[in-house]
Amino acid sequence: MTPIEFDGSPTPSLGVEWEFALTDKGTGDLSNSAADLFALVSEQSPERRGKVHKELLRNTVEIVTGVCRDTPEAMADLRGTLDAVRDHTEQLGVDLYGAGTHPFAEWSTQLLTEGHRYAELIERTQWWGRQMLIWGVHVHVGISHRDKVLPILDALLNYYPHLLALSASSPMWAGQDTGYASNRAMMFQQLPTAGLPFQFGTWAEFEAFVADQKTTGIIDHINEIRWDIRPSPHLGTIEVRVCDGMTNLTDLAAIVALIHCLVVELDRRLEAGETLPQMAPWLVQENKWRAARYGLDAIVILDADCTERLVTDDLADLLVRLEPIARELNCVAELGRIAEIATHGTSYQRQREVYRQTRSLREVVASVVAELG
């Protein structure tokens, strides 16, 4: 069994990956124009080339930060790349669309990005792989030592429903309202290495799991483990992949600040000698489903004793607890925005309201595009 080295981060650094769909300005439908966009970035904004990434389908682009100290720095980094990319999307007649799913696009018309890795994924996953018209946000937080990673990851699962409820932006699929706040969360877990992480007691157990995956041909590289929360050993981070696509920088900043504060608080509690709380996998799984189904109206399970509470009520107390950490991490204003999202609603609710008023899925797309500003 080959050891998995964890390149620990000396500080709780921050990195953000923000996925967008490309939509046609005239029709609102998905546009398979990512290759043209990447060409324009390379030609006209070469300094941003490393921060604009390809994804599985040619209708998708991912904007990433460098290694940042805090949420304001990460948002400034994203904003700079976003401004450059939007200059190029204008030339192509497409918009950036930041929700977790598209309300009416057909998967059968989408083109695969060239590359052996993508072709192999589709060959293996077939219909489910081709269905993956989904977009999300991934947040990396630096961890100093590998022995902290799994306890923090397991404890973070207790907050899975909070993060998904706040970010849920995928209520519609193939022309229908699914009844879910986050259909993306339900779709993505169909891939064989995606979904909730397994919970391991030691790093050696994780290494044995990865070895089994490679021995049996399930994965060739550790990055092919696509869990909702996963270790990223080569970066020295925990990567939180729970969230649906975000429609605007303000809400994104709030989510990033919340994740940053949560991870740092759990890290400090662990260093102080505390055994971090965990819940059984079946409770974590139920929480994921409740948040995906009901969003901000979810009644979530809080602990191993099966205490239940409305997710927004629990968020209110969580924000008070994290405020001292937020001051240290320079994100008090951004974290405070979480309370506004909990009170005034998030994207899945706004999309449904636009459809209620207009009965037009094209107008839903336009409203999501407009939120990017």
Image: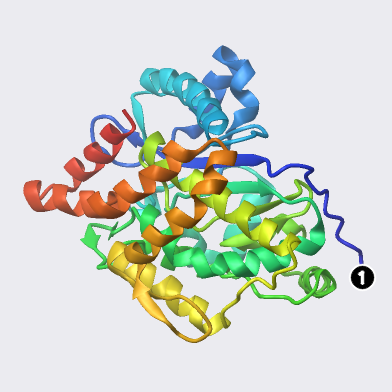
Of residues 369 and 29, the one nearer the viewer is 369
Q: Say which residue appears at 78% left-offset and 74% top-offset.
A: 209
Of residues 292 and 251, the one nearer the viewer is 251
Name the residue type under label 1.
Met
> Visible in this render: residue 294?
yes
Query: Compared to 277, does 244 lie above or below?
Result: above
Task: Indicate the quadrant where residue 151 lies.
Answer: bottom right
What residue does disc 1 label? 1
Is 139 situated left or right of 207 in this image?
left
Task: Indicate the quadrant where residue 314 lies.
Answer: bottom left
Query: Residue 87 location in percent, x, y?
Result: 42, 17
Query: Residue 373 location in percent, x, y?
Result: 31, 28
The image's colouring method is rainbow
Q: Dividing the image into 4 quarters, which one contains the N terminus? A: bottom right
Query: Compared to 290, does 72 lie above or below?
Result: above
Residue at the top extreme of this rendering? 44
Q: Say which residue appears at 29% left-offset and 41% top-offset.
A: 29
Task: Indicate the quadrant where residue 320 lies.
Answer: bottom left
Query: Compared to 282, does 327 lie above or below?
Result: above
Query: Residue 12 location in percent, x, y?
Result: 69, 44
Is 297 situated left or right of 79 in this image?
left
> Visible in this render: residue 20?
no
Crowding near the residue tagged with mark 1, few <14, some 14–19, many ≥20 C-alpha atoms within 10 Å: few
Q: Say which residue appears at 74% left-offset and 42% top-offset.
A: 11
